[in-house]
Image: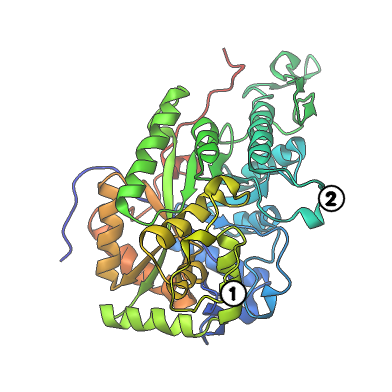
């Protein structure tokens, strides 16, 4: 019998599902269901399975501009436009939160605010927006020159501020519906925002009334100093990549402290590191599955992906089982794309002297997120350890292959439930309820 853990704090779990799994080689396994990807039936069935496991949210990542060359040997990460896919998922489910990724570099605040507010209404208050600055995609969006790292975050900060103002532009009781007097709405409770900034000029108000959650949940995934600051100011959920507990604890403490400096309680932000679990019948079986997945990877393509992750360095002439010469690694300040993720790989190359093969294994398996390899009990032990030790409020599960998700639902979730750290039933109706974050007060309510 699994032991019980006292206390009422509950672990948060979300799913980020790729094509048959996030591992580059996963689509080649017979259980990948890759032939079904690109169909609404598959993504809806995954969402329903995730809801049945009582997860907090179904997370829709995005790659706005796919790499044509890589598509020859690996499955595209996602075919569907996330906001549109989120609508289908919301209508096919009833309790699970639905988080859609949309770029602050490729959208405009008014349209995005309207779309996500609409999703919150259609879902009954289960919508979330994963606000990303985008590290690739300029070739399809007409932006020349491409903004640097600092420029993208400056635009993102103004973008999110405008969106939040637009979500607040309707007070909760603005609609009067007074047929006798002929007054449909109290215009004193419908506000312009009259925003004029370096990147945007938006008058407002929004043409969607205040949403069931007050504002939809904002998710942020950057872990650089600029990303952390943006999350501390605006995010209700943070998707981060961490490799060990000490690093996760530092990130957790830092982000909660930054939030407090903006007058926000730490409980208003749920921090969820990504985790990619391989679950075997034994530890040896799990290790064998891990190695079999790496055998399905195209070596040249995987090495090219690693080189891109490391800031576009040249890996020619380095053996697959050799460490990277330190002089080839750039300084973090010189890296413009995915800087925080670069730092994870660079630290492993510099400090741990990981070989190219080992670094490739991390990149193709989990994009730099935490890998857990073991039995269901061992995986549950590690998740619980991080959760109770202040390294996370929960996790975004990124199954490396299809059966890993099935095993997580069937084997790991019941252990966490038996230990009292994860729910057996939903107790709330909205994504904010699930995450345990506050409902925002309208800035005009006073």
Q: Residue 150: which disc?
A: none
Q: Quadrant of the C terminus?
A: top right
- Mark 1 is surrounded, within 10 Å at the Cα level, by few (under 14), some (14 to 19) or many (20 or more) other residues, namely few
Estimate the x, y position of residue 85 in percent, counting from the top left.
67, 58
The structure residue drawn at horizontal position 36% and vertical position 62%, both measured from the top left corner, is: 352
Question: Could you tell me residue 218's position as x and y percent?
Answer: 56, 40
Q: Residue furthest right?
A: 142
Residue 58 in view, yes or no:
yes
In the image, is residue 1 above or below residue 289?
Answer: above
Badge 2 crowding class, 10 Å Cα cut-off, few under 14, some 14 to 19, many 20 or more, is: few
Q: Position of residue 441 (x, y in %)?
A: 53, 23
**Quarter of the rendering containing residue 53:** bottom left
Farthest residue in the bottom direction? 30
Q: Nearer the viewer, residue 166 or 427?
A: 166
Q: Could one spot residue 44 in this view of the protein?
A: no
In the rendered structure, the answer to whether residue 430 lies left or right of residue 85 reads: left
In the structure shown, which secondary structural element does the residue marked by tag 1 occupy? loop
Which numbered tag is attached to residue 316?
1
Q: CA distance from mark 2 to mark 1?
A: 32 Å
Quarter residue 309 falls in = bottom right
Residue at image coords 46%, 73%: 361
Circles 2 and 1: CB atoms closer than 8 Å? no
The answer to which of 153 and 430 lies nearer the viewer is: 153
Position of residue 43 in the picture relative to residue 416 (left or right): right
| Residue 286 position within the rendered picture, expressed as x and y whole percent measured from the top left | 33, 78
Would you say 415 lies left or right of 441 here?
left
The numbered dot on residue 142 is 2
Give the secondary structure at mark 2.
loop
């Amino acid at each position: 019998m699994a032991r019980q853990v006292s206390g009422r704090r509950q672990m948060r779990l979300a799913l980020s599902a790729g094509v048959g799994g996030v591992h580059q080689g996963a689509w080649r396994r017979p259980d990948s269901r890759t032939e079904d990807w690109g169909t609404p039936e598959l993504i809806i069935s995954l969402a329903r399975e995730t809801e049945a496991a009582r997860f907090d949210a179904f997370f829709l990542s995005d790659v706005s501009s796919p790499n044509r060359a890589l598509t020859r040997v690996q499955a595209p990460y996602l075919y569907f436009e996330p906001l549109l896919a989120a609508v289908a998922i919301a209508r096919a489910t009833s309790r699970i939160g639905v988080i859609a990724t949309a770029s602050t570099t490729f959208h405009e605040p008014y349209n995005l605010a309207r779309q996500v507010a609409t999703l919150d209404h259609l879902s009954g208050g289960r919508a979330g927006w994963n606000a990303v600055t985008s590290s690739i995609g300029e070739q399809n969006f007409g932006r020349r020159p491409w903004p640097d790292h600092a420029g993208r975050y400056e635009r993102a900060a103004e973008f999110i501020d405008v969106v939040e103002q637009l979500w607040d532009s309707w007070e909760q009781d603005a609609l009067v519906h007074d047929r006798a007097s002929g007054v449909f709405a109290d215009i004193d409770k419908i506000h312009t925002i009259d925003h004029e900034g370096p990147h945007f000029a938006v008058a407002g108000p929004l043409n969607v009334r205040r949403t069931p959650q007050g504002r939809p949940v904002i998710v942020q995934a950057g872990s650089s100093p600029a990303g952390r600051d943006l999350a501390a100011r605006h995010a209700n959920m943070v998707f981060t990549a961490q490799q060990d507990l000490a690093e996760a604890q530092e990130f957790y403490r830092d982000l909660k402290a930054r939030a407090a400096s903006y007058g926000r309680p730490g409980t208003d932000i749920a921090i969820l590191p990504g985790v990619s679990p391989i679950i075997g019948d034994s530890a040896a079986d799990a290790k064998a599955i891990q190695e079999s997945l790496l055998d399905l990877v195209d070596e040249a393509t995987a090495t090219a992906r690693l080189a891109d992750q490391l800031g576009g360095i040249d890996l020619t002439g380095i053996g697959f089982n050799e460490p990277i010469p330190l002089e080839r690694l750039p300084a973090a300040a010189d890296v413009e794309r995915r800087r925080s993720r670069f730092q994870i790989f660079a630290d492993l190359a510099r400090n741990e002297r990981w070989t190219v093969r080992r670094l490739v294994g991390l990149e193709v398996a989990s994009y730099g997120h935490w890998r857990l390899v073991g039995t269901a009990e061992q995986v549950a032990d590690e998740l619980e350890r991080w959760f109770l030790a202040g390294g996370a409020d929960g996790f975004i599960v990124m199954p490396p292959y299809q059966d890993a998700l099935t095993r997580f639902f069937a084997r790991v979730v019941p252990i966490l439930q038996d230990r009292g750290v994860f729910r057996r039933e939903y107790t709330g109706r909205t994504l904010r309820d699930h995450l345990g974050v506050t409902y925002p007060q309208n800035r005009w309510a006073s």
